[in-house]
Image (cartoon, rainbow, N blue to C red):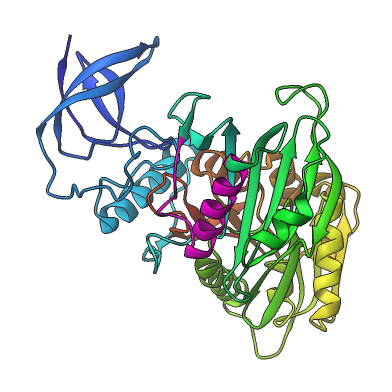
């Protein structure tokens, strides 16, 4: 039975919010102020999940999605909305999460930074494969939605994806269950990583030479089947397998498996904003110290080196630390140190004392799950300024609450939309010590 529901707002995760007889219902692929006929597909104690039967009152901000599988594929949530509305929705979710979860109300909210390219921006992707089906998982499912291309992919990435799919369907790779691909606009070249659930005698060298612009291939094997608990291990490589991008004149090289931002155009604006916030109020010349926690291959760390006498990058992934050190050396960066460690462990071990940190700027840029332990340890050490870079408003709000409880105020926040058409977002929050 359908229920007429007025959509009153949006929730993190891609759905919009309404009520049925007073109970909250989350409904994807709708828009604020629409009235829709909804069937309940999942019932929980405090909320329901619904699916749209019919749009009874349509928003003026609705647009026709560019992708033929939008609404089925779980990769995108907002292709049905004008881009300006996507940005507005994300900012509203961010500010609501900060207040509702973390009791954080920033003194200043900078205008949201929308993407310059709402489509064609992704420089890397991970593709699920089952027989001749190549694509992303269906919404709320492990079923693969077959695609021939993706409008979010950089054109180079789409070219590689199409060529790879065509050749491998013609000549299957035994045991192939996942494919990671990446490209560099700067080089005009691409790389690929194959995940297999057993050894294969497939001619990967031949594949490398068959696809224009493909410069390298890595092979990873997973024992015990693709659904086993063991992680895939490196097996072999062919050609040059380092991905490449440049930001603010610094060239970065990293293996495909090391995290880098998938939107290299907006990454430039992310770095510029971090630097502006980190150096705000700074006197002429370079400030003494900056620390970059969860630094990866040095994306933010090396940019900070131009404005600080000493910069320390802390990262737990060994391959990322190796790449970061190589990038520092290749770019002639001085005063930069990279440490392999969990962020919270490094902070509590006293690698830098309170006096050293008291005037420092610290960037905390954890994965989607956040890092509450590091947030607590950092706040206890009381650096002058903490910049939290986040891709998850709920975990951001949780961690900021721990920082705020230790004598910090939220000076400003800004949304950066690095992932148009999806519910994902990036944000930067400035927390300053209250002396």
**Does 206 sit above or below residue 37?**
below
Nearest the viewer among 308 and 336 is 336
Q: Position of residue 342 (x, y in %)?
A: 82, 46
Q: Residue furthest left?
A: 57
Residue 14 within the magenta-colored segment of the rendering? no
- Point out the image quarter for the N terminus: top left
**How many numbered marks does the figure carry?**
0
Toward the front, the furthest residue is 170
Looking at the image, residue 385 sits to the left or right of residue 347; the answer is left
Q: Which residues are magenta?
A: 146-169
Q: Is residue 78 left or right of residue 35?
A: right
Taking the spot 58% from the left edge, 36% from the top edge, the residue there is 128
Please tell me which residue lies in front, 88 or 14: 14
Residue 116 in picture, x, y percent from top left: 39, 69
Above/below status of 164 relative to 358 = above
Residue 105's x, y, as percent?
A: 43, 50
Q: Is residue 24 left or right of residue 35?
A: right
Is residue 359 at all visible to an observer of this figure? no
Which quadrant would residue 371 be assigned to in this image?
A: top right
Closer to us: 306 or 149: 149
Q: Residue furthest bottom?
A: 284
**Residue occupying the point 49% across, 62% down:** 154
Where residue 14 sits, quadrant-wise, is top left
Magenta span: chief secondary structure: helix
Q: Is residue 167 magenta?
A: yes
């Amino acid at each position: 039975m359908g229920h007429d529901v007025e959509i009153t707002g949006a929730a993190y995760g891609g759905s919009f919010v309404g009520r049925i007889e007073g109970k909250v219902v989350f409904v994807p692929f709708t828009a604020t102020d629409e009235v829709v006929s909804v069937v309940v597909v999942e019932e929980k104690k405090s909320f329901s999940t619904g699916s749209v039967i019919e749009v009874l009152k349509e928003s003026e901000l609705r647009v026709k999605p560019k992708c033929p599988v939008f609404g089925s594929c779980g990769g995108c949530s907002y292709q049905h909305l004008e881009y300006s509305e996507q940005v507005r929705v994300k900012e509203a979710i961010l500010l609501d999460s900060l207040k509702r979860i973390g009791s954080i109300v920033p003194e200043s909210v900078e205008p949201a930074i929308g993407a310059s390219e709402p489509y064609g921006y992704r420089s890397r992707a991970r593709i699920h494969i089952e027989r001749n089906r190549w694509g992303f998982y269906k919404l709320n499912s492990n079923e693969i939605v077959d695609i021939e291309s993706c409008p979010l992919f950089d054109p180079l990435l789409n070219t590689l994806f199409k060529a790879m799919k065509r050749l491998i369907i013609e000549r299957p790779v035994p045991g192939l269950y996942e494919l990671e691909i990446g490209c560099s606009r700067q080089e005009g070249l691409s790389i690929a990583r194959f995940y297999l659930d057993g050894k294969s005698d497939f001619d990967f060298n031949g594949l490398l030479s068959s696809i224009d612009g493909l410069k390298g291939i890595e092979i990873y094997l997973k024992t015990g089947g693709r659904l086993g608990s063991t992680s895939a291990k490196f097996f072999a490589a062919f050609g040059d397998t380092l991905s490449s991008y440049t930001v603010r004149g610094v060239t970065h090289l990293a293996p495909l498996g090391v995290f880098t931002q998938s939107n290299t155009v907006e990454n430039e604006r992310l770095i510029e904003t971090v630097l502006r916030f980190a150096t705000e109020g700074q006197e002429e010349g370079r400030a003494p110290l900056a620390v970059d926690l969860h630094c990866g291959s040095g994306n933010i760390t090396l940019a900070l080196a131009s404005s600080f006498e000493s910069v320390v990058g802390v990262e737990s992934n060994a391959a990322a630390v190796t790449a970061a050190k190589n990038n520092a050396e290749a770019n002639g960066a001085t005063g930069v140190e990279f440490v392999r460690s969990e962020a919270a462990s490094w902070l509590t071990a006293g690698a830098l004392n309170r006096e050293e940190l008291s005037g420092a700027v610290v960037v905390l840029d954890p994965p989607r799950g956040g890092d509450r332990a590091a947030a607590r340890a950092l706040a206890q050490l009381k650096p002058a300024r903490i910049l939290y870079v986040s891709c998850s408003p709920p975990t951001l709000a949780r961690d900021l609450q721990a920082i705020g409880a230790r004598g910090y105020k939220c000076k400003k926040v800004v949304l950066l939309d690095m992932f148009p058409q999806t519910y994902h977002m990036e944000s930067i929050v400035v927390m300053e010590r209250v002396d």
